[in-house]
Image (tube, rainbow, N blue to C red):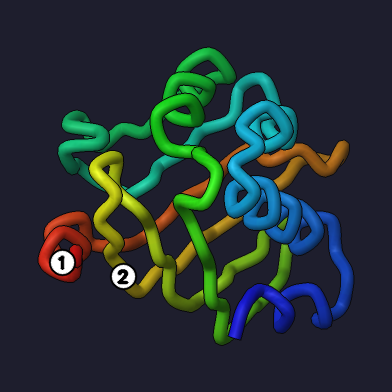
């Protein structure tokens, strides 16, 4: 599996944005990934409080999303395997597994639900990623 299921699904602006987001993050192209977002976008990855976002409020605006991007979007650090995709109302939901490499080189995985919302220009206004930080840490090898 990979993101092929999403690529082969009916095309919509939100689904296309989700595909580009996954492709660019897997390629480690932080600048390209950041360019997908509206100026006032919100990224909640993971959703809720975690060591990555103690407040749980997410990163609001391009400057804050850029800091997230610099810290976590790296070459050869993220891989998605998507099993299901749904679309409607300017949003796309992808369900699957994410594999992520930590800064010290260990690999972990977690089940994930990613929600992408886009504006009329096709820019991402919200990326909400549901996954369990603590569970991910337990899978590290």
Where's residue 20, x and y in %? 75, 52
Q: State yes or no: discs 1 and 2 in contact (Cβ < 8 Å).
A: yes
Query: Residue, x 64% and y 49% (percent of image)?
Result: 27
Q: Is residue 37 visible?
A: yes
In screen coordinates, is 50 left or right of 1? left
Q: Which residue is mark 2?
A: 110
Q: Which mark is residue 119?
A: none
Label 2 sits on a secondary structure element that is strand
Distance CA(mark 1)–CA(mark 2): 7 Å
The image position of residue 85, as x and y in percent, is 64, 78
Residue at (68%, 32%) from the top-left corner?
A: 37
Q: Which residue position holds label 1?
A: 135
Task: Please say if 139 is above or below 25.
Answer: below
Relative depth, front residue between 26 and 106? 106
Q: Quadrant of residue 11?
A: bottom right
Q: Is residue 100 above or below residue 45?
A: below
Name the residue at the front extreme: 105
Is residue 138 toward the left or the right of residue 114 in the image? Answer: left
Q: x, y percentage for residue 88?
A: 72, 69
């Amino acid at each position: 599996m990979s993101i092929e299921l999403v690529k082969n699904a009916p095309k919509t602006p939100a689904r296309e944005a989700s595909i580009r987001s996954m492709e660019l993050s897997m390629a480690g192209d932080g600048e390209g990934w950041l360019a997908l977002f509206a100026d006032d976008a919100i990224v909640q990855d993971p959703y809720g409080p975690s060591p990555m976002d103690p407040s749980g409020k997410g990163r609001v605006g391009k400057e804050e999303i850029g800091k997230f991007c610099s810290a976590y979007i790296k070459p050869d650090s993220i891989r998605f395997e998507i099993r299901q995709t749904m679309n409607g109302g300017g949003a796309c939901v992808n369900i699957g597994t994410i594999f992520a490499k930590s800064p010290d080189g260990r690999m972990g995985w977690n089940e994930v639900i990613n929600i992408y919302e886009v504006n009329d220009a096709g820019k991402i206004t919200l990326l909400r990623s549901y996954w369990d930080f603590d569970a991910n840490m337990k899978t590290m090898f």
